[in-house]
Amino acid sequence: MTTTQAESLDIFGKKKSVLITNVIAHNTPVDIFIDAEETITDIGPEIRKRHRGEAEFIVDGDGALALPSLSNMHTHAAMSLLRGYADDMILQDWLAQKIWPLEAHLTADDVYWGTKLACVEMIRTGTTAFNDMYFQMESAAKAVDEAGIRAVLCYGFIDLGDAEKREHECKATEALAAHIKGMNNPRVRVAAGPHAPYTVSPEGLKWCAEFARDQQIPVHIHLSETEKEVNDCVSRHGKRPAALLDECGILTPRTIVAHGCWLDDAECALLGKRGVSVAHNPASNMKLATHRAMPYPQLAAAGANVCLGTDGCASNNNLDMFEEVKIAALLQKFFWNDPTVLPAPAALEMATTNGAKALGFGTGTLAAGAPADIILVSTRIPCNTPLHNAASNLVYACSGAAVETTICNGRVLMLDREIPGEAEILKNAAHAAAGLVKRAQNPRGN
Ligand SMILES: [Zn+2]
């Protein structure tokens, strides 16, 4: 690229019209023009001639692949602070002995720096929208607002069948919704976040379903990650988890369920019928050995909107959606013993179009009139040489490190791999993570 650092500093995060020249989109050499109102206004071969005069900033794409930026459809962003803290353990031991005791000491400041770190990692690897569930979400909302990307944020609602707890969780959900609506930032939205059918009572699930319907907001929930939770649900409620959710009004086209490893055929059909989005989390599922892959072929055949997420950094251990796309394609082929399952173009769609459709920001496509959420992936690197097939390279050869420029809502957030303020964020996040571990190991501070 021909931009100098001085020029780049004047563009980061600014509301300016941008002309991207000499990129490849949909296998065609094109230019892209973004107006100062955050929208792609023109895309096509040689359109630079029409727009060179009016563009306030020009990015020379140098033959890069342009594609809609990726959507991470299930994560706990602030868990970036727990990256590498505990690995290679049985799921229940990992949660009870390592993760929950540490999370008990999380402060609002920790969540702020953890989410800032996550946003930098996402921008660097081509993701500009994510679906998040955690605690202290007002801090997460502030981090997302500052980072310039998009998120649907929810408070993880857990009542464990206790009426008093439930009342507290309802209030926390209402407070977060009011806070985020009050921010009046179209990039930051709220969802209802019942944690899972095994941590939330049917009363709590019903409350979340009604609240989400009244507010017309998404529902984000974990579903059937392990065989144990399915068996427990059947013995406690006499029905499988998806049927329970349906009875409580949770399953609608505004709903995103995460994992879905142990869904049976009838549940896949039900999720398809209700128009639910299902977030596949293959790296986390393999690392924690859930022993079954999400039934992608059955869900896709049933018409469910299958998308992709990384889960939190404690069980992945990164937020690189390019890596996740490859793992999804490989896991599905391996588990179903069929190399034709989840071909590259479909895997890429999971991470772009399908995720964007579930989040409802109108992103996920490179077309005139669409929001300008665009990434440029270098073709001057080994993983994109030769370029027989762009979708194949993007899914099977490239990682997020191949992303060189990231744009969200028409604002340039990374240019030539430079993200302003990154070093400071890494320093503060590492400091927060060290403080968190210290407090957890020595809670009385002596
Ligand atoms: Zn999760």
Image (tube, rainbow, N blue to C red):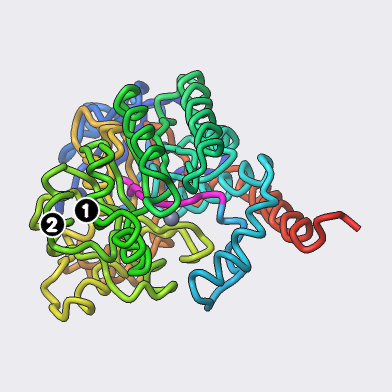
Give the class, few, some or many, for how many residues have Cα within 10 Å of label 2's Cα (few <14, many ≥20).
some
- The residue lying at 21 percent from left, 30 percent from top is 42
> Observer-nearest residue: 423 or 77?
77
Q: Residue at x 66, y 52 (%)?
A: 104
Look at 27% across and 70% down and name the residue there.
293
Q: Which residues are magenta?
A: 69-78
Query: Residue 213 appears at what percent x and percent y?
Result: 29, 27
Label 1: how many Cα within 10 Å (few below 14, some 14–19, many 20+): many
View extreme (left): residue = 301
Q: Where residue 221 sits: x, y (%)?
A: 37, 47
Q: Amino acid at mark 1?
A: Val
Residue closer to the observer: 135 or 49: 135
Instruction: Indicate the quadrant containing the C terminus: top left, top right, bottom left or bottom right.
Output: bottom right
The amino acid marked with disc number 2 is Ala
| Ligand 1 has an atom within 8 Å of the beta carbon of the residue at disc 1 | no
Q: Can residue 323 be seen from the camera position used here?
A: no
Specify whether 244 is left or right of 77. left
Q: Is residue 70 magenta?
A: yes
Residue 116 seen by the camera: yes
Whether 69 is drawn above or below 264: the answer is above
Q: Main secondary structure of the magenta part?
A: strand
Residue 348 at x, y percent in the picture: 23, 57
- Is residue 415 part of the magenta span, yes or no? no
Residue 187 is left or right of residue 335, and the answer is right
| Label 1 element class | strand
Res 34 quadrant in image: top left
Q: Nearer the viewer, residue 438 or 159?
A: 159
Element type where label 2 sits in the image: helix
x, y percent for residue 388: 16, 69
Q: Is label 2 in contact with label 1 (beta carbons under 8 Å)? A: yes
Judging by the rendered image, the residue that carries numbered circle 1 is 306
Question: Which residue corresponds to mark 2?
Answer: 300
